[in-house]
Amino acid sequence: MVNLIIGKKGTGKTKQLIDRVNAAVQIDKGHLVFINNGQRHVYDLDHKIRLIDTSEFKIDTYQSLYGLLCGVMAQDYDISNIFIDSITKIIPGQDIADAECVFEELEHVAAKFNVNIVITASIAVEDAPEYIKKYL
């Protein structure tokens, strides 16, 4: 399953995501992964959560992010949840409207490997492309 948390910058999306991942680690039996562009949330996360800093890799398109996610899932079959903070910061300069096919591919691979993926994006609800509304 793929879920998206959207809202304008400064509306508390990251705090909501961190609260969700820290709550999930208490009840979930699988492994949890938090993907972010940087290390700024390393002390906000429970030590059991795997933090992946995308600034260490050349992630510059939605397709390259999809490849990273597939690699993460292929490496660890015990992953139950992946949390991605601010997809628009991970891939700057790319329009979220161009990510429709990647969201569809993520939906397919998440279902196949029974992984929940939660993504935040700084975009106003009224400005969101139509395809995004099914992930809210």
Image (cartoon, rainbow, N blue to C red):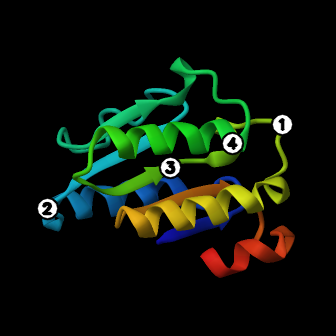
Amino acid under disc 4: Gln
Q: Nearer the viewer, mark 1 or mark 4?
A: 4
Residue 80 relative to residue 34: left or right: left
Contact, mark 4 vs mark 2 (Cβ under 8 Å): no
Q: Earlier in the sequence, mark 4 or mark 3?
A: 4
- Where is 124 relative to 67, above or below? below
Residue 32 in sight from this viewpoint:
yes
Q: Nearer the viewer, mark 4 or mark 3?
A: 4
Q: CA distance from mark 2 to mark 1?
A: 37 Å
Residue 63 got which mark?
A: 4
Residue 84 got which mark?
A: 3
Q: Quick one: SS at disc 3?
A: strand
The C terminus sits in image quarter: bottom right
Q: Nearer the viewer, mark 2 or mark 1?
A: 2
Picture residue at 40% right of the left edge, 36% below the top: 41
Residue 29 got which mark?
A: 2
